[in-house]
Amino acid sequence: MDQATDVFQPLQVDDPPVVAGYRLAARLGAGGMGRVYLSHTPGGRPVAIKVVRPELADDPDFRRRFAREVRAARRVRGAYTAELIDADADGVPPWLATLYVPGPSLTEAVARRGPLPVPAVLTLMAGVAEALQAIHAEGIVHRDLKPSNVLLASDGPRVIDFGIALAADGTSYTATGNTIGTPAFMAPEQASGDDVTAATDVFALGQTAAFAALGRPLYGDGAGVNMLYRIVHSAPDLSLLPEPLRPLFARCLAADPAERATAAEVVEWCRQRLGADSGAGGGPALWREITGPEVVVPAPVPDPTPVSPQPLIGHPQSPAGWPRTTAQQRKPRGRRAALIAAAGVAGGALLVTALAWSLMDAKDGSAGRDTAGSRTSATGPAARSSASAPGSSSEAPDSSAPGAGDGGAGASGDGAPSSASPRDPRPEGFALLWLDAKNSLSLKSSDPRLKNRKGDVRFGCASAGCELKSDSTVFVQMFGGHGTTLDECRLFLNHAKSHNLPLAAAANGTEICMKDAEGNIGLYVIQTKSTALPDIAFLQGDLTIWRKAA
């Protein structure tokens, strides 16, 4: 199988296309801390983006530890580490970016070719020990050194994920039995819950190198609790290891942390043996045979280009964070049909009749609607309206037509009538608004964000679950796809009476129409929903407001 196919997996449906401005090119893998993706810096240099799992991101203690470890990790500069270049501990969710290492993990290399020869094990141990020196010099303990956290570049190993396991230790995620450390590579003191020090990483280095030499864990396979028991209560069987390496392994795997070799001593011991054995089948050629053929890294993902460029209002992404496709822009009739069906079930004959009249009026008023469409083609929730934005290139008004200069109804560039209505107010877009137990939104304010609970749209979580609630604003959750228009919000809000909207069925990308007592209509598109822990639950989404539109 092509090695590149194994390394660079296509993004899946639940993967974001962008993380904090980094456009993702492929998925690299997943682990106890989160998912890892390939991206590129603005200059085109490949980076690995790790996005933290929601279970950890919802824990405020984790965020504090994560921020502390990120600050320390930024200072680590070593020839055998993957440098941390960017991170955001306060992001939703938290994430970090390290330089991408084009090479297999030690786990993958051993699985492909079997145990490594002695010179390669010595090269591995020297490089990893030197990386530990750089890491420990900044006061960081790796805590989760293992074969999958050692990448084999063409010029030597690279250690990744240093310090991140410490951020996760002690959170609600680990407290429920999901230990961040890996049992087969833990030190006795770590398995027993005692103090973890730099010597703990040296023990893990010995186990990692033993895996490379044997092709399997030194303490055997099986359930994690059984491996931990053997690590704590029995000495390793060094007779399984190549004889030249046994003295060093004995020092690294000593039960007492005080008796273990230091990282500097490991480097010195390995360098001496590599110098003596440099002509015995070692060197760069052997290392390149182990790392395998060079992998071609995918090119950076270009920014999406709208089908018909228009001025963007608000967030330049579709509701779920994905660029809107041409197919999504060209299916207004199918969406209207879905809404008719939903309206018939939810609202009865009166609602269906109103929708029918709406469609008839639209058909009579614009013979060219099939071509022009009732929605703008600019991506982003703030641009979704039955009224075209002034200056639109796809429906630019004729300068000689009445009202062309002020966004009124004019002729489109191809002679077809515009679908914009002169009565529709101009949409106002607000990107990534935060809602939690301490703030609120107001559709009538020039800036809808309020850092108090005095707004008419509030978010809260009770024993029955989380919900949006209001004293006078009514809510309707929209179904049947993305791209809700002002006309569709008007239609469904016309008969809405509920001032509470349970969010149990809402997900990222859910669209919610709302109308206040003054006739202001809003469309809130959820970008992030975090309700696993009610005490710190929140929503983040994009809001479009049409003033006095009811």
Image: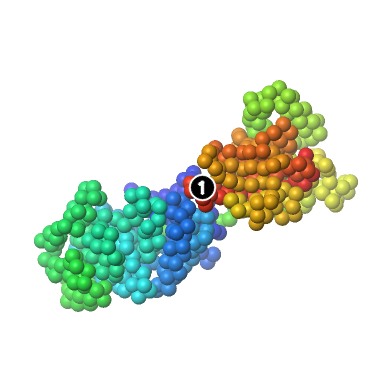
Q: Judge left or right: residue 41 versus residue 293.
A: right
Q: Residue at x 44, y 62 (%)?
A: 66
How did the renderer colour the structure?
Answer: rainbow
Q: Is residue 3 left or right of residue 353?
A: left
From this viewpoint, is residue 388 visible? Answer: no
Q: Residue furthest front?
A: 463
Q: Secondary structure at mark 1?
A: helix
Q: Quadrant of residue 198?
A: bottom left
Depth check: give the residue in front, 511 or 322. Answer: 511
Q: Position of residue 248 (x, y in %)?
A: 17, 70
> Please, what is the three-letter code of the amino acid marked with disc 1?
Pro
Which of these two is toward me, 160 or 366?
160
Q: Quadrant of residue 466?
A: top right
Instruction: Note whether 191 is above or below 370 in the view shown.
Output: below
x and y percent of residue 218 in the render?
Answer: 19, 57
Tell me the crowding category of disc 1: few under 14, some 14 to 19, or many 20 or more residues within 10 angstroms, Cα based. some
- Does residue 268 appear anywhere in the picture? yes
Instruction: Name the side, left or right, on which 239 lies relative to 187.
Output: left
Determine the image quadrant of residue 474: top right
**Rendered position, 536 above or below 123:** above
- Residue extending farthest to the top is 349
* Residue 497 % position (x, y): 69, 33
Total residue callouts: 1
Residue at the spot x=69%, y=51% of the render? 454
Residue at 72% x, 31% y: name it: 495
| Residue, disc 1 | 534
**Residue 391, placed above or below residue 187:** above
The one nearer the camera, 325 or 489, is 489
At 40% across and 61% down in the image, what residue appears?
167
From the image, which quarter does the C terminus lie in?
top right
Give the percent coordinates (x, y) of residue 405: 85, 52
